[in-house]
Image (cartoon, rainbow, N blue to C red):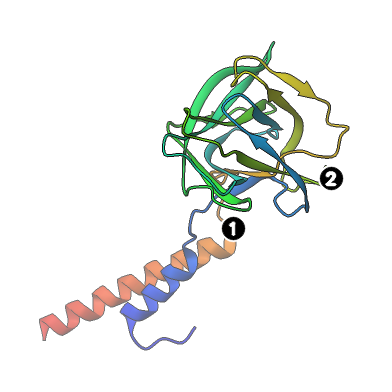
Amino acid sequence: MNCNHPRLCAAAVMALAATTAQADVLVSNLAQPERAFSELTSLFWAAQSFVTDGSSHPLQSIDAMLGTSAYRGDDTEYVAELHASGPGIIGSLLTTFSFGSTPSGAPTAISLLPDSGVTLAAGTTYWLVVGERHGSLDSEYLGWSYADGNASTGPGSLGAFGYSTDGGMSWSASTFDTPNPFRLAVNVAPVAAVPEPSSIALMALGLVALLAMRRVHRTEVSR
């Protein structure tokens, strides 16, 4: 790298060495084609399980393929929750989610943002529960798209899905032999990586450039 100005040189090197922390995908099947979608109401809720890999991960968000029918009543509350796995299929509530955008029309990827911090344990099953609560003014449904096939990407995996006919009070699970897991992507904080030798060398070069810049500045001041 040729650089005649120490300040610009240092900035360029440090920018090159720095990395922007972004989410890692633990497991996703969003790229799979849609087979159909389930119509979720105040009574009929759905859940999809996923299994973590051999590491623990702070959960950042979950993207779910959600949409709605044409009419939405003004007292609808969309529900998304993360649950542990338990004896009754769906275990204890771990966190609720805020919807990054409002589902509307055909299913699209809606970001679900955890309302409290959750660290996913290694080798553990979790359930994303989706439904809605509404009163007499509502006649619409919340649609959750499911895939035509079991394929997924990422170090984690997808498991069974389940349904509730009483608004999440009790659950029955379907086996994963049926190729229609609900479409989602679980996004987690990236695992801290050990800097590669090339990155360390770049950072060292940046520090040298900064020192050179300070030396030039002092020389100019002394004059």
Q: Is residue 132 left or right of residue 151?
A: left
Tell me where residue 153 appears, x and y as whole percent: 74, 48
**Which quarter of the rendering shows the C terminus?**
bottom left
Q: Amino acid at mark 2?
A: Gly
The local crowd at label 2, few if under 14, some if 14 to 19, many if 20 or more residues have their Cα within 10 Å, is some
Vertical comparison of 68 with 170: above or below:
below
Q: Earlier along the polypeptide chain: callout 2 or callout 1? A: 2
Tell me where residue 57 appears, x and y as whole percent: 57, 36
Observer-nearest of 102 and 54: 102
Q: Answer yes or no: is residue 193 visible.
A: no
Observer-nearest of 25 and 217: 25
Q: Answer yes or no: is residue 39 visible.
A: yes
Residue located at (67% from left, 37% from top): 39
Residue located at (39% from left, 79% from top): 9
Q: Is residue 125 left or right of residue 119?
A: right
Q: Quadrant of residue 160?
A: top right
The residue that mark 1 highlights is 196
Which circle marks residue 149 in the picture?
2
> Of the residues tagged 2 and 1, which is closer to the observer?
2
Residue that extends furthest to the top in the rendered view of this protein:
87
Which circle marks residue 96 in the picture?
none
Tell me where residue 185 appears, x and y as whole percent: 64, 45
Observer-nearest of 53 and 6: 53
